[in-house]
Amino acid sequence: MEFSSKRTYRNDLDEKMALYARMNIPEYFRYDSDRRYLPSPLLGFRLVEGKYVEIAPDVDAAIHSEILALNFHLTEEGLTLYDPQSERWLQTLAEQEAAARQKAEAEVARLQAELERLKERG
């Protein structure tokens, strides 16, 4: 996955693609978070007979990676990944940490309530 910027997008479109094709990298994805530098903010390519062929988005506008077995999606939050096998959205590290924090806070609240209940009985 290449993250394109004003400084890199021309190189991403030409030289890097040619280099990766020579290296037999089976898939190549580019993401333009600013939505200014690429023809589409999310592009995927698959190596076919030594040349990259653009991967057409599916009906949900996702681009499927056969190598990773994941779908790349663009949402209001940015680039997201979906695992069609587990039918789950993958979380970023920040999302995982937030979920773990919420779970821990809920457990603390449950234990505090249990402690209060035991004090009242005692």
Image: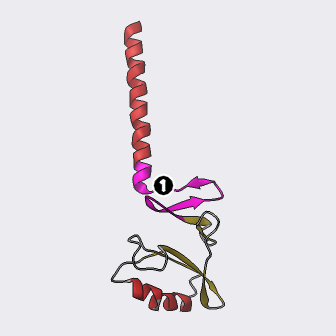
Callout count: 1
Residue situated in front as seen by the camera: 115 or 82:
82
Q: Residues within 10 Å of mark 1 (few under 14, many from 20)?
A: few
Quadrant assignment for the C terminus = top left
Question: Per the image, is 36 magenta?
Answer: no
Q: Amino acid at mark 1?
A: Gln
Name which residue lies at 43% across and 74% down: 32
Residue located farthest toward the left when viewing the structure as drawn: 7
Question: Per the image, is 84 magenta?
Answer: yes
Name which residue lies at 49% across and 76% down: 40
Percent x, y for residue 79?
Answer: 47, 64
Q: Is residue 101 above or below residue 67?
A: above
- Which residue matches tag 1? 91
Decide if residue 69 is on the left or right side of residue 108. Answer: right
Q: How was this image coloured?
A: secondary structure
SS label for mark 1: loop
**Quadrant of residue 9 in the image?**
bottom left
Percent x, y for residue 95?
Answer: 43, 51
Percent x, y for residue 112?
Answer: 37, 23
Q: Is residue 117 above or below residue 12?
A: above
Decide if residue 41 is on the left or right side of residue 44. Answer: left
Percent x, y for residue 36?
Answer: 39, 76
Q: Is residue 114 visible?
A: yes
Q: Is residue 122 visible?
A: no
Q: Is residue 27 above or below residue 93?
A: below
Give the residues drawn in magenta, as a range. 73-97
